[in-house]
């Protein structure tokens, strides 16, 4: 039995359109499923826990939505040990991208109905679990600005969700001010003056495919950290084309770190996001929870450290 978790509002209504297509495909294939429409990020966890509680034979929970929708149900899936599958219907879809899940609906459904899982790490902090990255500073401000913008709705309406992030970068660059930050990785503290951003990644990309931590692996038990500091606005703008290809990591104003636990403290209040959802402006303390969640992925073998895909239902 599959639980379909649907956020009809994701991707500016793409969630609802995608669900109609998926419903027809599931019925044509004779696949057994239950559908759950979640109302909000805050109520999703209890809705999903309630839905999962009444039977034991779940093969997977298939989320139709974007990164924010997936974020809202991570705690429930981890708690019940149910595997996550994704049919992308958001704007950025970085979770799907990170697990090699196709953006095309039928191909994503094919991947969701197979039995190939990656045993993924998750980031755990005071605000709960995150699957892709916890970002703070400039790029978190970009996400907050994009989520509150009219251009996100317009871009989604013309099915150009990634364009909204490009507009958001330019918009935020005008107003954002860098400041001092202290980053403590596995107990070792480093301070950076005029820091723009600190990203703590489990997957290589966020923000609609920007390869912030190109070396990040979802199942290595480690968090990859990218700090951008001591750079002018013009240099930062010129950095973005290199981030698209993940070629920024050796630049002098980029510091990459890796560890199991990371704490970030900006000298002034700076926004933070997890999976693109706002975490507010408090200092961050995040640790890696190795292998906490099984994720269905057509590339599970290629992405896993040992080259082997796991069964989604087997324990261990
Ligand atoms: N489970 C949920 N059910 C209903 N609404 C949700 C849920 N989770 C989050 N939301 C709200 O819906 C908004 C859109 O969802 P989501 O983040 O999945 O799509 P998106 O923003 O279009 O895509 P992406 O996050 O991939 O860029 C979220 O920002 C949040 O406000």
Image: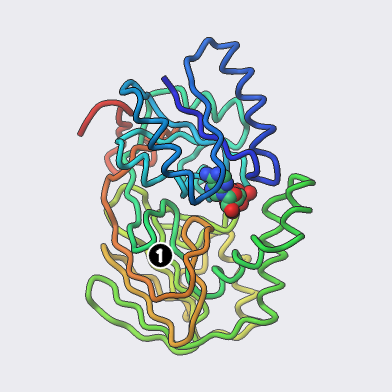
Measured along the vertical axis of the image, is residue 112 above or below residue 186?
above
Could you tell me if residue 94 is visible in this image?
yes
Measured along the vertical axis of the image, is residue 316 above or below residue 222?
above
Residue depicted at 47% across the width and 80% down the height: 252
User: In which image quadrant can residue 182 be found?
Assistant: bottom left
- Indicate left or right for 242 with 135 as reference: right
Residue depicted at 34% across the width and 44% down the height: 120
According to the image, what is the colour scheme of the structure? rainbow
- Label count reads 1
Residue depicted at 60% across the width and 66% down the height: 144
- Depth check: give the residue in front, 45 or 104: 45
- Depth check: give the residue in front, 108 or 236: 108
- Depth check: give the residue in front, 248 or 7: 7
In the rendering, at what x and y percent does residue 51 appear? 42, 31
Could you tell me if residue 67 is visible in this image?
no
User: In which image quadrant can residue 1 be found?
Assistant: top left
Measured along the vertical axis of the image, is residue 298 above or below residue 132?
above
Image quadrant in which the C terminus is located? top left
In the rendering, at what x and y percent does residue 266 appear? 43, 82
In the rendering, at what x and y percent does residue 225 appear? 39, 67
Query: Which residue is the extreme one toward the left?
Result: 316
Disc 1 packing (10 Å; few <14; some 14–19; many ≥20): many
Measured along the vertical axis of the image, is residue 276 above or below residue 27?
below
In the rendering, at what x and y percent does residue 34 appear? 49, 23
Mark 1 and ligand 1: say if the CB distance to the nearest ligand atom is below 8 Å: no
Residue depicted at 32% across the width and 49% down the height: 121
User: In which image quadrant can residue 45 be found?
Assistant: top left
- Indicate left or right for 211 with 134 as reference: right
Tell me the element at label 1. strand
Q: In this figure, which residue is indicated by the disc labeled 1? A: 200
């Amino acid at each position: 039995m599959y639980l379909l978790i649907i956020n009809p509002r994701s991707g500016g209504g793409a969630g609802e359109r995608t669900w109609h297509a998926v419903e027809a495909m599931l019925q044509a294939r004779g696949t057994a499923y239950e559908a759950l429409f979640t109302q909000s990020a805050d109520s999703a966890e209890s809705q999903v826990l309630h839905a999962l509680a009444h039977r034991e034979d779940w093969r997977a929970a298939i989320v139709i939505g974007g990164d924010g929708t997936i974020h809202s149900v991570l705690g429930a899936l981890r708690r019940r040990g149910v595997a996550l599958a994704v049919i992308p219907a958001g704007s950025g879809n970085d979770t799907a991208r990170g697990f090699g899940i196709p953006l095309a609906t039928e191909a994503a459904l094919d991947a969701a109905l197979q039995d190939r899982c990656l045993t993924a790490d998750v980031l755990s902090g005071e605000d709960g679990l995150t699957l892709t990255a916890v970002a703070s500073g400039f790029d978190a401000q970009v996400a907050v600005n994009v989520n509150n913008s009219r251009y996100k709705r317009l871009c989604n309406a013309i099915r150009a969700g990634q364009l909204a992030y490009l507009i958001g970068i330019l918009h935020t660059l005008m107003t954002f001010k860098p400041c001092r930050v202290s980053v403590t990785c596995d107990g070792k503290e480093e301070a950076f003056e005029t820091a723009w951003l600190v990203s703590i990644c489990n997957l290589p990309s966020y923000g609609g495919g920007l390869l912030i931590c190109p070396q990040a692996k979802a199942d290595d038990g480690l968090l990859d950290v990218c700090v951008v500091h001591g750079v002018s606005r013009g240099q930062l703008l010129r950095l973005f084309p290199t981030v698209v290809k993940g070629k920024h990591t050796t630049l002098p104003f980029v510091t990459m770190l890796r560890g199991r636990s990371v704490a970030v403290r900006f000298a002034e209040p700076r926004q933070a996001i997890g999976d693109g959802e706002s975490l507010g402006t408090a200092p961050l303390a995040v640790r890696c929870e190795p292998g906490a969640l099984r994720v269905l992925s057509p590339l599970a073998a290629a992405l896993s450290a040992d080259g082997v895909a796991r069964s989604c239902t087997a324990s261990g």
